[in-house]
């Protein structure tokens, strides 16, 4: 049976159109049915179909969008980097064919990444559902205001109340994103864990907390909030929250499956992006 491939192409990236054309031509020359899904900004509608593999052509943000769209369907993603050095978009555009060939031959072990499902309950009714590969962030829509959030584990165990600028609930993959900027720990991206990280907490004792990924978080917006509260998913999707809204975060029953050239590339990216090699001082 011929394979089917979809290309998620971020047209904001330089050389996106030409790289997509190159990949499409090579795949179709092999008799592989190829669908090109190009977009600028936030796509309005996803293409429909069943695919054996997806190419993400862009940067880390493109990988995040592709993962949220296709991971529930079990579609592996080959992330071709058209931006700056990224943690997710790891495959160089000159190496895509070699990586694809190895995937076809079964010579690549997929990198399995824990994802979260997020829902919002209002008046005991579910009014929003989403998923994330990096993080979910709850914050004020105004600058320099504290928010009060009550956190429970598995709905019945009170963890505490947080007065802070916001909360980051991060996957291990997202540990190098907003959570790290807020002082959170860096985790190996293939771990199964959940990071609860307060942003600029009023109490010095409120520290980043790493939980097993099978724990469910229930976060309630305190009733006394007077201004808008915002839920942001993977830095891309937003949802306005109200007082007493409950945000449920739990591990998804599926993983993001990434087709990577080198398992150790993540550590190389850490050294380069965080200047651990000491070159910043040269």
Image (tube, helix red, strand yellow):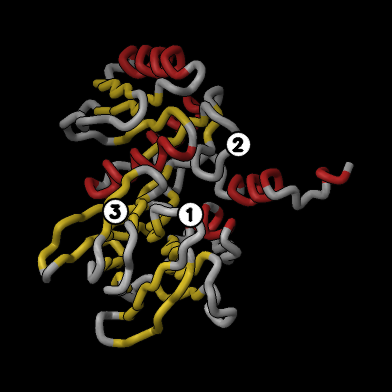
What's the residue at 23%, 61% (across, down)? 119
Query: Circle 1 — which element?
Result: loop
Point out the tag, 2 or 3, that comes first from the N-terminus: 2
Whether the residues at callouts 3 and 1 have beta carbons within 8 Å, the answer is no
Task: Look at the numbered discs 1 and 2 and tell me whether their residues touch, using CB distance below 8 Å.
Answer: no
Q: Which of marks 3 and 1 is in front?
A: 1
The residue shown at (35%, 51%) is 233
Alpha-carbon span between mark 1 and mark 2: 30 Å
Closer to us: mark 1 or mark 2? 1
Above or below, comparing residue 190 to residue 274 in the picture? below
Neighbourhood count class around disc 2 (C-alpha, 10 Å): few under 14, some 14–19, many 20 upward: some
Which residue has dot 2 on it?
85
The secondary element bearing badge 3 is classed as strand
In this rendering, position of residue 72 left or right of residue 77: left
217 or 82: nearer the eye? 217
The correct choice, above or below, for 131 with respect to 59 in the image is below
- Which residue is tagged 3? 131
Query: For mark 1, what is the residue?
Result: 143
Earlier along the polypeptide chain: callout 3 or callout 1? Answer: 3
Residue 130: mark: none
Image location (x, y in percent) of residue 95 = 54, 27
Distance, label 3 to label 1, CA atoms, is 26 Å
- Mark 2, secondary structure of its residue: loop
State whether residue 131 is above or below residue 194.
Answer: above
Q: How crowded is mark 1: few (under 14 residues within 10 Å), some or many (20 or more)?
A: few
- Mark 3 nearby-residue class (10 Å; few <14, some 14–19, many ≥20): many
Quadrant occupied by the N terminus: top left
Residue under the point 49% across and 34% down: 59
């Amino acid at each position: 049976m011929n394979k089917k491939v979809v290309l998620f192409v971020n047209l904001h990236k330089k050389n996106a159109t030409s790289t997509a054309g190159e990949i499409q031509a090579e795949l179709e020359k092999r008799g592989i049915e190829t669908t090109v899904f190009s977009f600028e900004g936030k796509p309005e509608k996803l293409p429909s179909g069943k695919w054996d593999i997806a190419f993400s052509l862009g940067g880390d943000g493109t990988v995040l969008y592709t993962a949220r769209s296709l991971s529930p369907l079990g579609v592996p993603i080959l992330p071709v980097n058209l931006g700056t050095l990224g943690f997710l978009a790891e495959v160089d555009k000159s190496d895509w064919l070699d990586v694809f060939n190895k995937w076809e031959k079964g010579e690549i072990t997929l990198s399995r990444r824990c994802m979260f499902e997020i829902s919002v309950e209002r008046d005991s009714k579910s009014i929003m559902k989403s998923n994330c590969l990096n993080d979910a962030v709850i914050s004020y829509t105004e600058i320099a205001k504290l928010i009060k959030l009550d956190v429970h584990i598995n709905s019945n165990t009170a963890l505490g109340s947080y007065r802070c600028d916001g909360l980051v609930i991060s996957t291990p993959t997202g540990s190098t994103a907003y959570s790290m900027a807020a002082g959170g720990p860096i985790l190996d991206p293939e771990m199964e864990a959940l990071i609860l990280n307060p942003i600029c907490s009023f109490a010095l004792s409120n520290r980043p907390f790493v939980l097993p990924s099978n724990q469910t978080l229930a976060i309630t917006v305190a009733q006394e909030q007077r201004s808008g509260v915002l839920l942001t998913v993977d830095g891309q999707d937003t949802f306005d929250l109200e007082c007493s809204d409950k945000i449920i975060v739990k591990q998804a029953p599926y993983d993001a499956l990434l087709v990577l050239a080198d398992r150790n590339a993540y550590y190389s990216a850490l050294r380069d992006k965080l200047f651990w090699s000491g070159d910043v001082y040269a």
